[in-house]
Image (cartoon, grey):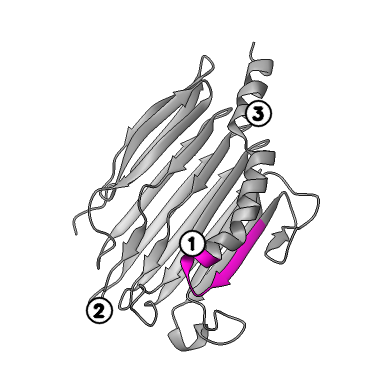
Amino acid sequence: MTETVTTKVHVELVHGRARFTEMRSGTFLRAQPLHVDGPVARLALIGSYAMLLAGDDLRLDIHVGPGVWLELVEPSGTVAYHAQGGSASWSASIRVDEDAQLVWRSAPFVVTAGANVRRHTQIGLGDGARALISETLVLGRTYEDGGGPLRSTMRVDHVGKPLLVEDLDLRDTAHRDLPGVLGSNRTMASVLLVGARPGAAEGVHETRLAGSGALARALAPQAHEAQAAVDISWDRWSKKYLDPADHRRTSEIIAP
């Protein structure tokens, strides 16, 4: 694979309206604006071709400027294929500035048998910013016993201070099948809320973070089962903390 081109998106608030001031399609993902209504914008991330193969290095850079509400949409998921002795990587760098909001309900990330993947997500939020991000990791396709080695790391900083630092090391296929790790499950669905802290955790899948945030997570044999378990958290948090209509009304009130 030749040098990777990073998919880059920068959206700013210009005269009360969201504007994509920088938008560059990368080697693996094409950025496609869907809709803009005042400070609210939606953008699709569309795969350019089959990925991830051995040697692939997918990079994503998202910057949400002050006061913008941005939703990222993925029409299809990512599949890491047999690496043929090699490896692949996926990384996302996300910056959400002051009073901005990001909503990203990502499509499933499937690690097939024989794949070898390193995945990293870096998120930084400014004062008054919020983000709601979901991810579903699937180890193996339906007809496979499990997926190949996966290491998934995440770091979330809120107003310059670390809020969540996670290192999920699932490279040892024998250890990850133990009780207390994945057991017989091959799917993990997560919903991360940053910039707001619910008054109390509801249900066994939710955990309030030490700072301004919360995490809902579920394990299940099938992707739809794990996703269904955390969908309640997604629906409640999105309506209460990241509703685009509320953001639009607030922007109109504070506009000069």
Q: Residues within 10 Å of mark 2 (few under 14, many from 20)?
A: few
Pick the residue in front: 128 or 131.
131
The answer to whether 158 appears left or right of 31 in the picture is right
Q: Which mark is residue 202?
A: none
Q: Residue at x 65, y 58 (%)?
A: 215
Q: Which residues are magenta?
A: 215-225
Q: Earlier in the sequence, mark 3 or mark 2?
A: 2
Name the residue furthest right: 199
Query: Regarding mark 3 in the picture, which secondary structure is present there?
Result: helix
Q: Which residue is mark 2?
A: 85
Q: Is any atom of residue 158 visible in this view?
A: no
The amino acid beneath tag 3 is Asp
Q: Which mark is residue 136?
A: 1
Q: Residue at x 27, y 59 (%)?
A: 51
Q: Is any atom of residue 101 visible in this view?
A: yes
Q: Earlier in the sequence, mark 2 or mark 1?
A: 2
Q: Give the Cα separation between the discs numbered 2 and 1.
A: 25 Å
Q: Residues within 10 Å of mark 3 (few under 14, many from 20)?
A: few
Q: Which residue is mark 3?
A: 246
**Image x and y of residue 248, in percent:** 60, 24
